[in-house]
Amino acid sequence: REMGANWVIDQHDVTVELYLRDMAALKAIASDPAFASFAALEEPYISRKHVVVSLGWVEVYVQNGEVVGVDEDGRPTYSPYAEFVKEGGQLSRLLHS
């Protein structure tokens, strides 16, 4: 279907989403033997040959009823996307830590 953009729509039956606070939590899950044992349970349903992984982030502005992630002028304190993904930027440091 034409969506008016250069998008690819995934054709799949299962989506698993994990929301984690940091890369350390992701690494801990990936190395957890209990998590690894799920592969045997999933095998009849999920093909490991066709797994697609997406990495993203959520910018939080309200947490526990409090405004967060902005300075006193209301501007976001999160890094601009270009800064976040540039070579040697925060994403690179997180992935290689």
Image: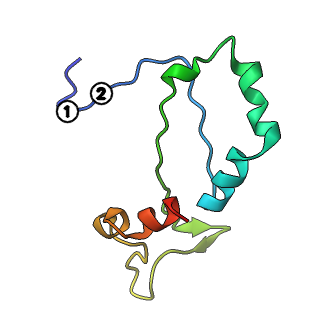
- Residue 88 quadrant: bottom left
Answer above or below: position of 74 versus 58: below
Q: Is residue 96 left or right of residue 79?
A: right
x, y percent for residue 37? 79, 30
Asked if residue 32 lies left or right of residue 94, the reply is right
- Residue 10 sits in which quadrant? top left
Question: Would you call the spot at circle 2 few (<14 residues within 10 Å), some (14-19), or many (20 or more)?
Answer: few
From what the image shows, is residue 11 above or below residue 74? above
Q: Give the answer, above or below, for where 51 lies relative to 93.
A: above
| Residue at 61% over, 18% down | 46
Question: As drawn, which residue projects farthest toward the front?
Answer: 96
Residue indicated by mark 1: 6
**Mark 1 crowd level (few <14, some 14–19, many ≥20, 10 Å Cα):** few
Q: Residue at x 51, y 64 (%)?
A: 94
Q: Give the percent coordinates (x, y) of residue 89.
A: 38, 70
Residue plotted at (70% across, 20% down): 42
Q: Position of residue 49 (x, y in %)?
A: 52, 21
- Give the Cα separation between the discs numbered 2 and 1: 7 Å
The residue that label 2 is drawn on is 8
Reply above or below: 38 against 13.
Answer: below
Q: Amino acid at mark 2?
A: Val
Hey, what amino acid is under mark 1?
Asn
Q: Look at the numbered disc 2 and give the secondary structure of its residue.
A: loop
Q: Position of residue 77 (x, y in %)?
A: 43, 78
